[in-house]
């Protein structure tokens, strides 16, 4: 294809048009900037230097000078909410919604901000009402997330499931862990009310949503055990090993209790021994030790504890070794040492959330700090202490 030389004549024209457009944009920007009150820029400086209280004062002064600046209203409302002044944030956004000159995009923005105010203030009914309206707008994503937060806080699990499924469709991000946990929470409510059939149904729904939902199998085992179906309970708990073996820590004691009821303690001891060998589970090893001590006596328990202490020296192994040693003996110095070690172990053991690092002595399915699900590992961590044990 021949090069059209006449295009070269147009290049200076294109450059000239670009220069003019840029000059117009800069001129417009300078014009708009010059109309803003000086207190607006002071407010920005305070925000940059992380002084929200002074920024609020500056923006409030700027609004007195020019009450028609929408950006200032929204910035000030966000600051009120950030500093916990919820009444002022609510009044400001309500005032914006009462303005007749507000275009539809600004009305939606003010409505979304007001809903966030209500949420932060704990006025969940009012927040829910607005967020439900916003689910049909460009704010659908944030509105659904806020609704999910509300329903979890209010323990409205059916609504939480519905909203989570809508969020999955909207964003493409899977929420199967959360949905399965919501079904487990529903089952927990059913169990408290004695509705075991409904509980089983919800737990099966949980496994349908997330086949690796350990909690569902643990709860199914609990239902079967309470109904006297110990073999069925053991089958449900055994399934945990196929999902996440670490969670056997939560069911080892339950399993041994069922084997006792069935009179199959040898099978139970063998199964627990194999689980400890394969997965190095501390709490399961303790259940195995206690059962061995009770069923086979101190000598067998001592041999087990001694072998463990040789292979993996730890305070936990030493505690079990001492417990086997002093079993059946009168109180003495060894018992004092064992008590000191046990107290130390109890004080230093904790579970840590993998998401936010929150620590707790008790295992949680739902982190009390960051509200994420299934972020607490069932294994204990232990704090390093520089103090003496006794």
Image (cartoon, helix red, strand yellow):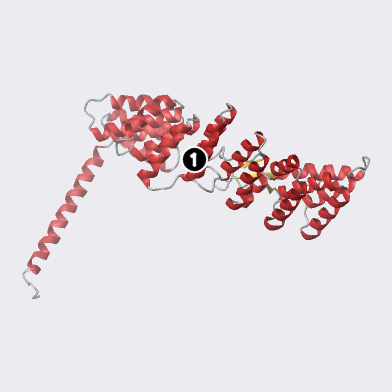
154 with respect to 30 (left or right): right
242 with respect to 16 (left or right): right
Residue 44: image location, x then y, percent = 37, 40
Which residue is painted at 46% across and 27% down in the image?
122
195 with respect to 14 (left or right): right
Residue 93: image location, x then y, percent = 34, 28
Above or below residue 31? Residue 131 is above
From where the camera sits, is residue 73 visible?
no
Q: Secondary structure at mark 1?
A: helix
Residue 269: image location, x then y, percent = 76, 50
Residue 372: image location, x then y, percent = 52, 42
Which residue is painted at 40% across and 28% down in the image?
127
Asked where in the image residue 314 lies, by quadrant, the reply is bottom right
199 with respect to 61 (left or right): right
Quadrant (top left, top right, bottom left, bottom right) of the N terminus: bottom left
Viewer-proximal residue among 228 and 143: 228
From where the camera sits, is residue 109 visible?
yes
Question: Label 1 neighbourhood size at 10 Å, few (<14), some (14-19), many (20+)?
Answer: some
Viewer-proximal residue among 357 and 323: 323
Task: Name the outermost residue toward the left.
Answer: 6
Q: Which residue is mark 1?
A: 205
Task: Name the outermost residue toward the bottom.
Answer: 2
Quadrant (top left, top right, bottom left, bottom right) of the C terminus: top right
């Amino acid at each position: 294809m021949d090069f059209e030389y006449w295009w070269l004549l147009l290049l200076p024209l294109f450059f000239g048009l670009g220069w003019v457009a840029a000059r117009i944009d800069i001129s417009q920007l300078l014009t708009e900037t010059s109309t803003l009150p000086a207190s607006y820029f002071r407010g920005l400086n305070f925000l940059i230097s992380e002084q929200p209280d002074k920024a609020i004062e500056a923006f409030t002064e700027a609004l007195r000078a020019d009450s028609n600046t929408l950006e200032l209203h929204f910035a000030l409302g966000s600051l009120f909410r950030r500093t916990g002044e919820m009444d002022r944030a609510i009044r400001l956004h309500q005032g914006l919604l009462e303005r007749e000159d507000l275009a539809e995009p600004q009305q939606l923005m003010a409505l979304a901000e007001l809903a966030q105010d209500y949420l932060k203030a704990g006025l969940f009914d009012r927040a829910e009402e607005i967020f439900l309206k916003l689910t049909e707008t460009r704010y659908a994503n944030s509105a659904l997330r806020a609704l999910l937060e509300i329903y979890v806080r209010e323990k409205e699990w059916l609504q939480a499931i519905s909203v989570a499924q809508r969020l999955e469709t909207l964003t493409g991000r899977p929420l199967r862990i959360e949905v399965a946990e919501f079904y487990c929470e529903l089952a927990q409510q059913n169990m408290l009310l004695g509705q075991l059939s409904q509980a089983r149904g919800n737990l099966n729904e949980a496994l349908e949503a997330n086949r690796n939902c350990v909690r569902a199998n643990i709860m199914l085992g609990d239902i079967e055990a309470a109904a006297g179906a110990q073999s069925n309970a053991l089958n449900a708990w055994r399934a945990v090993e196929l999902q996440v073996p670490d969670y056997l820590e939560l069911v080892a004691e339950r399993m041994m209790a069922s084997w006792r009821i069935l009179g199959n303690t040898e099978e139970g001891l063998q199964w627990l021994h194999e689980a400890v060998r394969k997965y190095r589970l501390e709490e399961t090893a303790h259940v195995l030790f206690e059962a061995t001590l009770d069923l086979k006596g101190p000598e067998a328990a001592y041999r087990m504890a001694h072998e463990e202490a040789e292979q993996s020296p730890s305070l936990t192994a030493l505690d079990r070794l001492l417990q086997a040693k002093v079993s059946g003996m009168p109180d003495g110095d060894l018992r004092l040492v064992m008590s000191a070690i046990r107290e130390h172990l109890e004080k230093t053991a904790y579970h840590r959330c993998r998401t936010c690092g929150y620590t707790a002595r008790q295992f949680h399915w739902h982190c009390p700090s960051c509200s994420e699900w299934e972020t607490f590992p069932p294994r204990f961590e232990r704090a390093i202490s520089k103090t003496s044990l006794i």
